[in-house]
Amino acid sequence: MASEPKSRRRVDNRAIVRLVVLALLVLYALVFVLLNRDDVEVSFVFFTATTPLIVALVLVGLIGGVAGWLARGQARRRV
């Protein structure tokens, strides 16, 4: 019975650690957002609106996710 090379196991362990850290960050972000539901005045550059803070936090999270996704695509092209 042949075992997998150590480098293969190391990659799998790194992937597991990354998934666990990602899951913890997502869980933390969800709890943070859900605990901040008060209405706030938000300036959307061209207009201002009173909205639940949860909406502003989710919007900023989505913008950050899209920006990260776009930046990751640019980094891959340069390699």
Image (cartoon, grey):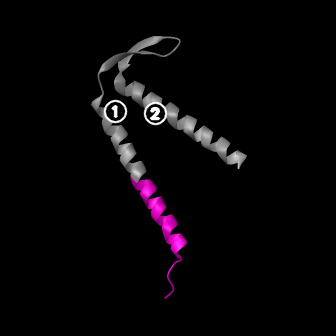
The answer to which of marks 2 and 1 sits earlier in the sequence is 1
Q: Is residue 70 left or right of residue 56?
A: right
Label number found at residue 67: none
Q: Does residue 44 appear left or right of residue 71 in this picture? A: left
Q: Is residue 49 above or below residue 68?
A: above
Image position of 69 with respect to 1: above or below: above
On residue 61, the disc is 2
Residue 66 at what x, y percent from top left? 55, 36
| In-front residue for pair 20/47 | 20
Magenta-colored segment: predominant secondary structure:
helix
Q: Residue at x 54, y 77 (%)?
A: 5
Q: Residue at x 42, y 58 (%)?
A: 17
User: Residue 59: x and y, percent?
Assistant: 45, 28
- The image quarter in which residue 49 lies: top left
Give the CA distance from mark 2 to mark 1.
10 Å
Determine the secondary structure under disc 2. Answer: helix
Rendered location of residue 26, percent (x, y): 39, 44
- Looking at the image, is 26 positioned above or below residue 6? above
Q: Amino acid at mark 2?
A: Gly
Q: Which residues are magenta?
A: 1-20
Q: Callout 2: few (<14), some (14-19), or many (20+) C-alpha neighbours within 10 Å?
A: few
Task: Pick the residue in front: 29 or 11.
Answer: 11
Residue at the image position 42 percent from the left and 31 percent from the top: 58
| Residue with the mark numbered 1 | 33
Q: Residues within 10 Å of mark 1 (few under 14, many from 20)?
A: some
Residue 6 vs residue 65, the one in the foreground: 6
**Do tag 2 and tag 1 residues touch (Cβ < 8 Å)?**
yes
Q: At 49% from the left edge and 65% from the top edge, which residue is drawn? A: 12
Provide residue 68's location: percent of width, then percent of height: 56, 39
